[in-house]
Structures are given as C-alpha cells and as structure tokens.
C-alpha cells in the first residue's frame, strides 16, 4: 500500500459525459501528479500540482482539467468524454525535495 | 526532451533462471532513473532508483540495475526469478533540474514459465 488513495476504482460512463476522479496523496506530500495509461499511448504524464498551484503540464487535453485543494487532495475532471478517453488514470504524490513518486491504485475509466 | 526505450515488449523466462530487462534513455541533461513494477490489476510500485553515486543500484525483491552513462542504459537484472515476478516492468526518467514529471518507456511484460 503506497498510501495514495484514488476513488472511484472503476467508472463506466457514456460519450459526451463529464466525470471527476479523486486522489488523496500520502500524508505530508505536497506534489500530486496525474498520469494516463492507455493501450495505444502507454503511460503519459498529464499534469502536476504542488501545494495547490499548477507546476507542470504534459499531454493534457483541453477537455481535461485538474485542481488541488487546500487539504492537498486533487481532482481530475474529464469532460465531453470520447471513446478514446477510456484508460487507467493514476495519481502519484511526492514529498518536498524527494525524487520518488508513489502511485495510487488507479481509476479505470470506460467510456461507452 | 527525454525519451525511454524498452527494447523488449515481452520476455518469457523459466523459473529460477536469470533475467535482464533492457532500458535505454535519451536526454540532453542529467537524469534520474527509475524502474517501476505493475502487477496485474494494480498500481505502480517502485523497484529501485538511480539518483547519483554508485552505478549499481539494489532494489526490492532481489532486483538490481546498473546505470551506464556512456551507453545511456539502465538495465534491470535478477539472478533467479520466481513465479511471483510475473508483471509488467516500466523504466522511467526524470531530469534533475526541477522538472519532476516521469517519462515512461512502453513497458516489458515478464512472464515466468514454471
């Protein structure tokens, strides 16, 4: 158990809908990262937050957005969903000055 | 920009045999290197990491990796594998200039044959 929690574990929805994925980092970790794992794209970095502020952006679509709240949990919002958005979405967290990212169990999103 | 190449998408190995999973990286700056393991239907677990210092890095579950700067490689090895090592293994890189995102390879599926 990495100490990073993600909810829900599974999500099934339809095209055009909007969903929110939630992540709680390990106690004391200020950085939260979101990654997408799909069969065709592999594991890709989406976005990083540090203590509530956006720190780095990767291959994140404009239909996707994220935020980190004062209690440090983070949410990834996916809107106007397409079939191709079906993937495993991982959240990871790290402590200040520490180079290791600890991953949550992931949320499997299926868009029908 | 950084990139990671995992040369083998699948590696079948007999139980108790040695294994090497290959990883090469490309970067214009100094890097940190990581190996993560993903067991079926689970998240990613850190096996080991290279930040600096000794080029031979030991990790959990008997795995080790050697950083070779001249060959830009970070191959993962285990002298004797077990059925429980069946999983997908990912090599990843980040730079050490404050850009903390991980760039992953495409993964190597290790299958242990009894």
Image: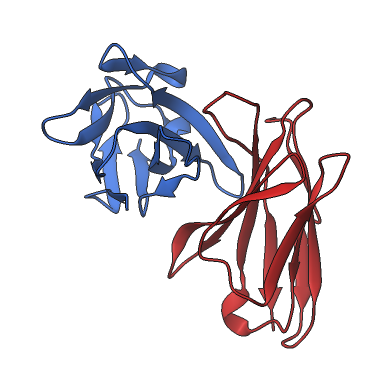
User: Where is residue B75, by image quadrant?
Assistant: top left
- Left/right placement of residue B8 relative to residue A49 reads left
Task: Please give the name of the residue rendered at 76% of the width and 25% of the height, measured from the top-left corner.
Answer: A28
Q: Is residue A96 left or right of residue B26?
A: right
Q: Residue at x 80, y 71 (%)?
A: A19
Q: Is B104 above or below relative to A109?
A: above
Whole-percent x, y for residue A32 in the image:
68, 43
Q: Quadrant of the C terminus of chain A?
A: bottom right
Identify the residue at image location x=73%, y=37%: A4
Task: Give the image location of residue B1, x and y in percent.
Answer: 32, 53
Residue furthest to the right: A71
Q: In the rendered image, is residue A9 in sight?
A: no
x and y percentages locating residue A16 in the rendered image: 74, 88
Rendered image coloring scheme: by chain
Q: Which chain, by letter, is red?
A: A
Task: Give the quadrant of the N terminus of chain A.
Answer: top right
Percent position (x, y) of residue B17? 25, 26
- In this rendering, the count of numbered labels is 0
Viewer-nearest residue: A63 or B104 = A63
In the image, residue B8 above or below residue A27: below
| Image quadrant where residue A8 sits | bottom right
Indicate left or right for B19 with B63 as reference: left
Chain B is shown in which shade? blue
- B10 versus A16 height, above or below: above
**Of all residues shown, which one is farthest toward the left?**
B70
Q: Which residue is most to the top? A: B54
Q: Is residue A54 visible?
A: yes
């Amino acid at each position: 158990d990495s100490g990073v929690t993600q909810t829900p574990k599974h999500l099934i929805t339809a095209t055009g809908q909007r969903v929110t994925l939630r992540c709680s980092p390990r106690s004391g970790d200020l950085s939260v990262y979101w990654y997408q794992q799909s069969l065709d794209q592999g594991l890709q970095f989406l976005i990083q937050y540090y203590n509530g502020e956006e720190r780095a952006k990767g291959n994140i679509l404009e239909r996707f957005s994220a935020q980190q709240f004062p209690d440090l949990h983070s949410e990834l919002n996916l809107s106007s969903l397409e079939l191709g958005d079906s993937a495993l979405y991982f959240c990871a967290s790290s402590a200040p000055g520490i180079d290791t990212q600890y991953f949550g169990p992931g949320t499997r999103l299926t868009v029908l | 920009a950084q990139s990671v190449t995992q040369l083998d998408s699948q590696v079948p190995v007999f139980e108790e045999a040695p294994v090497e999973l290959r990883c090469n990286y490309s970067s214009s700056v100094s890097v940190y290197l990581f190996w993560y393991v993903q067991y079926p239907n689970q998240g990613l677990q850190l096996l080991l990491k290279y930040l600096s210092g000794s080029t031979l890095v030991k990790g959990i579950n008997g795995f080790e990796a050697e950083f070779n700067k001249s060959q830009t490689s970070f191959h993962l090895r285990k002298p004797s594998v077990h059925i429980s090592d069946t999983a997908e293994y990912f090599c990843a890189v980040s730079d050490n200039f404050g850009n903390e995102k991980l760039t992953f390879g495409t993964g190597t599926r290790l299958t242990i044959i009894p």
